[in-house]
Amino acid sequence: MLAAPSDRRCAHLGQILVIEDDQLLCSQLCRLLSHQGYLTRYCHDGESGLQVALSEPHDLVLLDVKLPGLNGFSLLRRLREQRQTPVIMLTASGAEEERIRGLRHGADDYLAKPFNMTELQLRIDAVLRRARPHEPQRRETPQRLHADSLQLDRVSQEVRVAGQLVELTPIQFRLLWLLVEQRGEVLSKPYLYRSVLERDYSRYDRSLDMHISRIRRRLGEVGLAADQLQTLHGRGYQFL
């Protein structure tokens, strides 16, 4: 029903409550968060999740939409009557209506299943930074990235391949930086839209596809293999 697994060897960065009825996923999330340095608690149903969320202080709640007893939307509505704890909703589908409904009920962010753990960690970091605006960032942001012959300089926003300058727009630079920074991870379209284009994803919006295509073409012109920047249909993009 409720437990508090944590890795005491890690620094305590805050406490996160996971409300998720999929016990395997819940266990994976708790292990990941404990490894990152968070204390974690979990519940597998809406009623007990709401009780714990209201009775104990937490820095963040990861909340599944489809829960037995009390669904995630109802839980969030009742939670917001008493607490403003940051909430990231975990949805079983990428339906826009579901995401909009969650945000209207007071969710701080959402993530559609299946998701990769790196993306989840970045979403958590972003939400906690907004909730703790006066706290220093716990990670030092790198100023340069290297991936084989590809070099990116964050200060000058220059991209070079084997010393050759690649002309990219600021948006394209930010997009490539994020993909290279998380090299090997599949980054979803909704995540990239919010992180780079700063708006919600719509399946009718082709802006991201256009930017990816232009980045791929520019990199190819200076000899970078086209398949290093991959499109995974239905999943997102990945830099290898």
Image: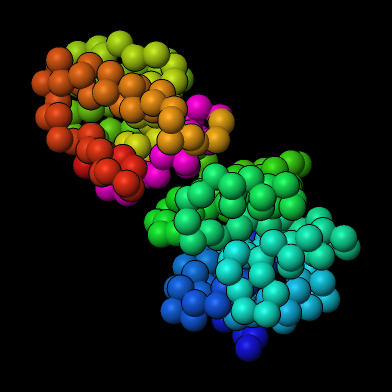
For the C terminus, the quadrant is top left
Image: 204 above or below 159? below
Question: Residue at 27% across / 43% down in the picture?
Answer: 233
Q: Describe residue 110's horizontal placement relative to residue 189 as left or right.
A: right
Q: Describe residue 68's horizontal placement relative to residue 55 as left or right.
A: left
Instruction: Name the residue at the right extreme.
Output: 82
| Total labels drawn | 0
Image: 157 above or below 128? above
Q: Quadrant of residue 178?
A: top left
Front residue of 112/27: it is 112
Front residue of 109/170: it is 109
Image: 225 above or below 186? above
Does any portion of residue 135 appear in the rendered image? no
Q: Which residues lie in the magenta part?
A: 182-198
Q: Describe residue 5's horizontal placement relative to residue 119 as left or right.
A: right
Is residue 229 rendered magenta in the image? no
In the rendered image, residue 146, in percent from the top left (x then y), is placed at 28, 33
Does any portion of residue 81 appear in the rendered image? yes
For the N terminus, the quadrant is bottom right
In the rendered image, residue 131, in percent from the top left (x then y), is placed at 73, 48
Is residue 190 rendered magenta in the image? yes
Front residue of 136/198: it is 198
Q: Quadrant of residue 79?
A: bottom right
Question: Residue at 45% across / 59% down in the picture?
Answer: 113
Question: Residue at 18% across / 36% down in the picture?
Answer: 228
In the rendered image, residue 179, in percent from the top left (x then y), is placed at 35, 37
Front residue of 147/18: it is 18
Image: 41 above or below 159? below
